Amino acid sequence: MSGHSKFANIKHKKEKNDAAKGKIFTIIGKELAVAVKEGGADPDNNSKLRDVIAKAKANNMPNDTIERGIRRAAGDVNSVNYETITYEGYGPGGVAIIVDTLTDNRNRTASNVRSAFTKGAGNIGTTGCVSYMFDRKGQIEIDKEEYEAEDFDELMMIALEAGAEDITEEDDSYEILTDPDSLGAVREALEAENIPLASAEVTMIPQNYVTLTNEDDIYHINRTLDMLDEDDDVQNVYHNWDEG
């Protein structure tokens, strides 16, 4: 099946913005530290660390930077006190927004996230108020510029046999969805076949999308998303606004 992937475009836009600001390395650095603290510095025995390393490589983080981050986290594991906090709320026009943060100061983070919602004419809600509108999935993207499958059926069989739920062919990529717990196994199966991955991560995919036509609403949702993207405590932002 081919077509337009709204979710992929949302994620690609955010990741390109983050990369331009150098933020993606900060995000991954925190994730490396947490993964090492939770499961140790040996990726062979720490599946979460393997997934973060794969994400780092997909975002062109140099190997020596990855290794340095792991060594630093392993040598100073007691100083890693990041806390994972998720915020949910609504932007203008009823757009659902989920914000994943990793912070060492929950008061600072809560204030900044609340400000982003408020200045964007939205409001933070209670836990669970919008997450039911999303499906938590493992998502793997393969850029066709890096890998053009000679046999799509073969690619599909590799993914499905490793535990993938679905694979679709888009205009410029292949997208594979998995159960979150199967993401690592599918990623490793693809890597074993030397298939380059543009991204591999657990994410939140909207069940439905909201279209905004009012210029004030569009201005405000962009303001909220920009403020969240600029916050170093924010790891991921998911929303169901159809920007297309």
Image (cartoon, grey):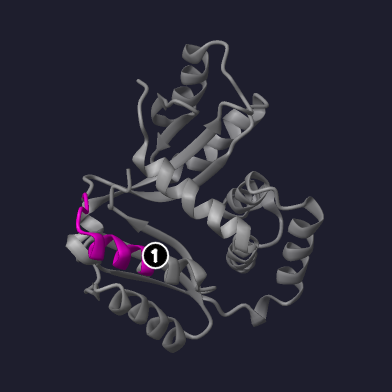
Q: Main secondary structure of the magenta part?
A: helix
Instruction: Name the residue rendered at 70%, 60% in the picture.
Output: 41
Report which quarter residue 195 is drawn in: top right
> Which quarter of the rendered picture does the C terminus lie within?
top left
Q: Nearer the viewer, residue 175 or 170?
A: 170
Q: Is residue 71 left or right of residue 87?
A: right
Where in the figure is residue 43, as x and y percent of width and height?
68, 51
- Locate residue 117: give its quadrant: bottom left
Is 214 one of the magenta-colored residues? yes
Residue carrying label 1: 225
Image position, residue 164 (x, y; %): 42, 31
Vertical arrangement, residue 97 with respect to residue 206, above or below: below
Q: Is residue 49 left or right of residue 174?
A: right
Q: Nearer the viewer, residue 103 or 26?
A: 26
The amino acid beneath tag 1 is Leu
Q: Position of residue 172 (x, y in %)?
A: 49, 28
Q: Residue furthest bottom?
A: 107
Under circle 1, the secondary element is helix
**Would you say residue 186 is visible in this rendering?**
no
Q: Residue at x 53, y 82 (%)?
A: 104
Q: Is residue 242 left or right of residue 34?
A: left
The stretch drawn in magenta includes residue 118: no
| 230 and 47: which is toward the camera | 230
> Which class describes the residues within 10 Å of circle 1: few (<14), some (14-19), or many (20+)?
many
The residue segment tinted magenta is 211-223
Quadrant including the N terminus: top left
Residue positioned 68% across, 26% down in the render: 194
Q: Residue 216 sits in which quadrant?
A: bottom left
